[in-house]
Image (cartoon, rainbow, N blue to C red):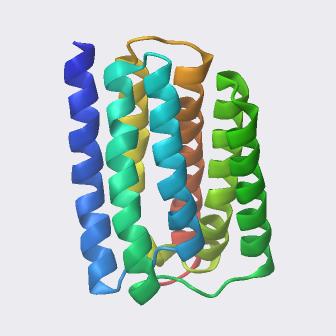
């Protein structure tokens, strides 16, 4: 059952990001270069930490997301948002500091906390960009991410702080981001 759910989370990631990739390649969605660079790192870090602590199938989605994030990061150089503001620089520096601490600490609990902090800093540039330009994000992808993170939590073969914190955080973060997109789309015309 958990293996099946783990595989379903990969398919949900792929299904959810097909429209995002399509919209990015068409120039409608504008991924923020800083966010997607950091999300690439975060996805692979979260996968490694979860895998090392026995998450099993519950870690598959983070590996798949690492690959998807890498594609979007590379594509963001051509069609993404590259206007870097002070908050983006601060977020990037804080994320790099957290990555450095993660490499030095070598403690799974602190490491996953730092991975979550890195992801929070990674989300800031996209949150800021989307406040003014909510139509530059593919809402369907983020809604499906909520469902995917819930299934990741259910599919964890070993449910503990290290394996559950990141998908729980991502579940909440995606809900908040979808709320921002829906609210701002009502206010800002396409």
Along the viewing direction, whichever of 71 and 177 lies nearer the viewer:
71
Q: Is residue 36 above or below residue 153?
A: below
Residue 78 coordinates in the image, percent (x, y)? 40, 88
Is 92 left or right of 76, judged from the image as shown? right
Q: Is residue 150 above or below residue 140?
A: above
Residue at 40 percent across and 60 percent down: it is 69
Residue 133 coordinates in the image, percent (x, y)? 55, 80
Q: Is residue 31 above or below residue 1?
A: below
Residue 25 coordinates in the image, percent (x, y)? 28, 81
Judge whether residue 138 can be spotted in this image. no
Q: Is residue 68 above or below residue 165?
A: below
Residue at 33 percent across and 58 percent down: it is 68
Give the mark count: 0
Is 76 left or right of 38, judged from the image as shown? left
Q: The C terminus appears in which quarter of the rendering?
A: bottom left
Judge whether residue 180 can be spotted in this image. yes
Q: The N terminus appears in which quarter of the rendering?
A: top left
Residue at 52 percent across and 53 percent down: it is 41
Q: Quadrant of residue 168?
A: top right
Residue 36 coordinates in the image, percent (x, y)? 50, 65
Residue at 47 percent across and 34 percent down: it is 48
Along the viewing direction, whichever of 180 and 77 lies nearer the viewer:
77
């Amino acid at each position: 059952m958990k293996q099946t759910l783990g595989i379903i989370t990969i398919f949900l990631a792929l299904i959810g990001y097909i429209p995002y990739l399509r919209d990015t390649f068409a120039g409608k969605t504008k991924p923020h270069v800083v966010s997607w660079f950091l999300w690439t790192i975060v996805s692979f870090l979260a996968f490694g930490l979860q895998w090392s602590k026995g998450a099993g199938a519950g870690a598959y989605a983070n590996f798949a997301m690492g690959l998807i994030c890498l594609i979007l990061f590379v594509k963001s150089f051509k069609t993404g948002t590259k206007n870097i503001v002070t908050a983006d620089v601060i977020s990037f520096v804080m994320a790099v500091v957290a990555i450095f601490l993660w490499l030095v600490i070598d403690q799974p609990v602190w490491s996953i906390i730092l991975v979550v902090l890195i992801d929070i800093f990674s989300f800031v540039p996209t949150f800021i960009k989307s406040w003014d330009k909510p139509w530059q994000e593919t809402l369907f992808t983020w809604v499906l991410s909520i469902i995917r993170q819930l299934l990741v939590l259910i599919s964890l073969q070993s449910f503990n702080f290290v394996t559950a914190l990141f998908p729980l955080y991502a579940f909440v973060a995606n809900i908040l981001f979808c709320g921002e997109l829906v609210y701002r789309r009502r206010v800002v015309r396409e």
